[in-house]
Image: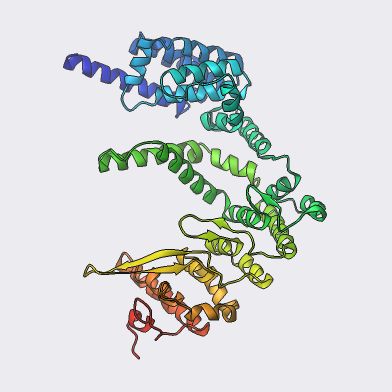
Amino acid sequence: MDENEKALDAAKAQALCFIYNSIFKDFIYRTKESSEIEKFFSEIGEIVPHQACFFEPWFRAFVCVANNDGKGSSENFLKALAALSDDVFRFVSGIKNADYLPAFFQQGLAFFLYINDTESAKKFWARGAENGLFAKPDSESFYDKIFKSFKAKEQFWVQFAPKMFFDEKKAAERAVSDYRASAKTGDALADAINDADFAAFESLCGSIDFDSRKIAGVSLLYYVIQRKEILCAGAGKFTENLVQIQADAMISRLNLSALPEDLRNRQYLEIFRQIRVTYEKSGLSKIMFCALFSKEGELGEKIAGIEKILDIIIAQTKDVDSFTKSAGGKTSTNALLLAAEIGDAPTLGKLIAKGSDVDKSLGSADFAMNYKDGSSISVQIPNSLVYRLISFNQFDALKFYLTEFKDKARKSMTAKTKKCNITPLAYFVLNTLYASKSEDEYEKNRALVDEFLPLFIEAGSALDQNTAFGTVRKLLGLKA
């Protein structure tokens, strides 16, 4: 292939990509006359005449979905699949920086499973498996297992965002209904908690063993604290977490370690951009939050409901420290440490009042300081309440704890071992002031240390107690 042919192919790919983005991402069909959209389809035949048999029906199928034309969607998706001859497949897969084939197969599979057309879904899976996009069927029951675990309703809305539909409002309502239906567990207690329905929960209380009952593998107490945190954080935080989780999951499935660092970083950024478009810019994450946690305008009511449920669970649980969950490495977590991690001061207070052990350490974590001269000091940090609050920078909850429960905190203020040769105040200074990355950050953290210093001292901390890092007095440069 000479340079002119390469330039022509590059131009074709760029023109095709423009049409693809206009239809799939800019949704131009929602604002233009159908005759104008037909021009886009006819241009495909001019740009890639030998591959238009695939691209045109696929693009038409997408627009048919947006118009709630199920018959047209089915016919065009299957027509596009049938057109994927080896030559066409090689051309499409050879276009650089294009995700045409994965997007096509994912859309087709999600669409047909959503409308319960499993035979057509099998055709998409089988052809995708032939080309390494899906796992190859290995038994008669393969499709039953795969399709049973495939969350068709959720996957449909991931592939076809409500914003792409001609009737966006109706599509959004349908998406909310689908997500809400998929969230139903069939467990009346779990559903009552998930809906933050205090009346429904209260009606079930007589039959609950609060110390042994679990939902999703965790205790009722732990589960409800998690639900409360999501509700209190709101849709914005839910979106941030969702984007991070989905991006991390996608990155973990890819082998990017062999790429040069600059290219690897670009790939990471592109993955986050794609996930953000899928969930945030499409409005899908907001729809999910509305369906799974709270409708707009009902958030305050839901938070009040989950608080009342939490109060009953704390009151009825005999040992609020009994359930523990691995937190990775050498640490575990329980209800108290979870409340500390997320900075839930009110729940922290209720658990301590119930008898939760503030000094109990569920493992330990490594902590080290590297100095400019190349030396370093390493110790173990107890995985207990006060250290958890400091590690996760939950300063409001830390202030609450040191102020309202200073007598409870007193023992931990000076407790240390050979292995954990550090105190909470020393750790606080090191984790904030000594971790500053700029002069502005240092000034901000110095003010934070000055604010907390009297609180730590009143709770029992000693400025002259020695640690692996020296005394707090020395760390702060204070005069004797």
Residue 117 horizontal side relative to residue 326, left or right: right
Q: Nearer the viewer, residue 389 or 468?
A: 468
Query: In the rendered image, is residue 72 in sight?
Result: yes
Q: Position of residue 191 (x, y in %)?
A: 71, 45
Spot the residue most to the bottom: 480
Q: Check the image and tell me how it is coloured.
A: rainbow
Residue 132 horizontal side relative to residue 12, left or right: right
Q: Position of residue 9 (x, y in %)?
A: 27, 17
Q: Position of residue 120 (x, y in %)?
A: 56, 15
Query: In the rendered image, is residue 168 in sight?
Result: no
Q: Nearer the viewer, residue 132 or 101?
A: 132
**Where 31 falls versus 342 (above or below)?**
above
Residue 360, quarter of picture: bottom right
**Where 116 falls versus 179 (above or below)?**
above
Residue 188, quarter of picture: top right
Residue 323 horizontal side relative to residue 96, left or right: right
Residue pictured at 40% horizontal, 10% vertical: 85
Q: Quadrant of the N terminus?
A: top left
**Where 234 falls versus 365 (above or below)?**
above
Q: Quadrant of the C terminus?
A: bottom left
Residue pictured at 51% horizontal, 56% vertical: 327
Q: Nearer the viewer, residue 216 or 291?
A: 216
Spot the residue most to the left: 2
Exactly how many numbered labels are in the figure?
A: 0
**Where 14 falls versus 260 (above or below)?**
above
Residue pictured at 39% horizontal, 38% vertical: 271
Q: Position of residue 479 (x, y in %)?
A: 33, 89
